[in-house]
Image (spheres, grey):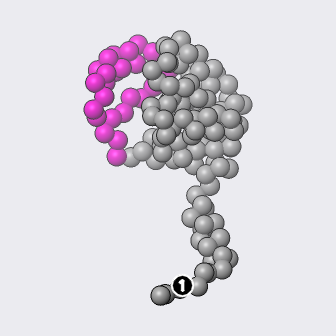
Amino acid sequence: GSNPHYEELRSRISHMKLSVRLERDVTRMSELMAWADVALSGAGSTCWELAFMGVPMVLYILAEDQRKIAEALDGNGIAINLGWYTDLSKEALSKALMGLVGNRKLRESMSEKGRALVDGFGSNRVLQTLEKTPTMPIRTK
């Protein structure tokens, strides 16, 4: 909702041949992720939701804490990391998106790898690990 370029983006999308939806102030994100074939996203926490939903990602880095996420997801074949948003060119973005949109096998592979990484059962595994960990005695003075 706070994107200052929203109107410009909307105008440019209207001239594209691809089916592109520009959303803001979204309240039904999982529905949109289920609809999408590809996502362009910052490399923050949304990546884990996209991976769970099996959506192939083209990522850009907005903050230092996102760098390792983008690099790891790219290195594991789950996303394409375009690097820092400040260094991103229109050509690189277009090439990455069009390459991914045009490569069904790559999208399927990225989708499978994303779902394998984030399967929704992580909290259960943490609890199982904690249950197996011996408790430390509490010492009082």
Name the residue carrying label 1. Answer: 138
Q: Which residues are magenta?
A: 1-27
Residue in front for this viewpoint, 53 or 134 = 134
Residue 100 coordinates in the image, percent (x, y): 62, 25
Is residue 77 depicted above or below 53 in this figure?
above
Residue in front for this viewpoint, 132 or 139 = 139
Residue 11, quarter of picture: top left
Residue 32 in view (yes/no): yes
Residue 85 coordinates in the image, percent (x, y): 46, 24
Q: Amino acid at mark 1?
A: Ile
12 vs 123, left or right, is left
Please name the predominant secondary structure of the magenta segment in the image: loop
Residue 73 coordinates in the image, percent (x, y): 62, 38
Is 2 colored magenta in this rendering?
A: yes
Residue drawn at 60 percent across, 81 percent down: 136
Instruction: List the single residue furthest toward the bottom.
Output: 141
